[in-house]
Image (cartoon, rainbow, N blue to C red):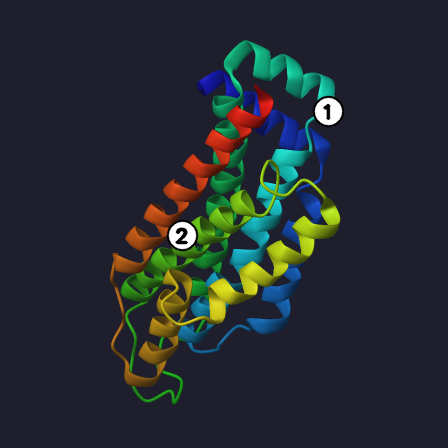
Amino acid sequence: MTALLRYQTALLLRSQRWLPPVILYAAFLGVGVQSGQPVLDSLGYTAAALLPVAAWLVRICVTGEPAAARACVTAARGPARSHLAALLTALAAAALLGTVATLIVTVISHHATNDHRLPVSPVRAGTAGLLATLACALLGSAVGALTNRPLLRSPGRAVPTMLLATLLAVVVGGSPAHAAVSGLVSGSESGRIPVSPLPLAAAALLTAAAFTTACALNGRRSS
């Protein structure tokens, strides 16, 4: 698996297809996050904006390999393992991107509630923001796994479905991403920082199920 992960990482970096989602994420943050804004609101925005980027990175990783190369890797390592390596590479890229953004936003933001009356611990705020960001990275990766190859192969179906699913994952109540982001927004009003691992744990379980499903189907359709 280590060799497959190195291969997928090199494939992603050399393709430069990661540039559009990363630039888009940076643009989102440049517009929506300004120095001196309340830290928890800014961290909520940072986490929510990562979700579609994570799904996009999954699409890049599972569709960017040339057909001949994919056939060789599948024959050598198996369809399920090769597909899992692509999914894990995308997840790792999204988590790294979100972690860097969270650290930067925590440093440049104003460590107070949105009415600027109550102080907010930057360490606890950064921890809560990182938990929310990782939850969104996980859930975005799960959405990407279920809305691309092998479940949906046609771009005309996969891309709109992926975009709709990422939107629903953020706004629908009960979603781990919605819970994590809304917790940050509520904390910015009350001053109580929501350092809870529950949304992250729920997102991890959903992502594990989505990855398992996608890899199992890839194995069946490749056999």
The label number, if any, that marks residue 175 in the structure image: none
Distance in Å between CA atoms under marks 1 and 2: 30 Å
Residue 57 in the image: x percent, y percent?
60, 44
Q: Is residue 133 left or right of residue 55?
A: left
Between marks 1 and 2 in the image, the one whose residue lies nearer the viewer: 1
Question: Percent position (x, y) of residue 31?
Answer: 63, 71
Q: Quadrant of residue 59?
A: top right
Q: Which residue is mark 2?
A: 134
Q: Is residue 146 visible?
A: yes
Check disc 1 and report the residue beneath it: 66
The residue drawn where x is 62% and y is 59% is 163
Label 2: element kind: helix
Residue in view at x 38 percent, y 42 percent: 209
Name which residue type carries label 2. Leu
Q: Would you identify the image quadrant in which residue 208 lies?
A: top left
Q: Secondary structure at mark 1?
A: loop
- State the residue at coordinates (45%, 38%): 213
Residue 5 seen in the current view: no
Looking at the picture, which amino acid does disc 1 mark?
Answer: Pro
The x and y percentages for residue 207 are: 41, 45
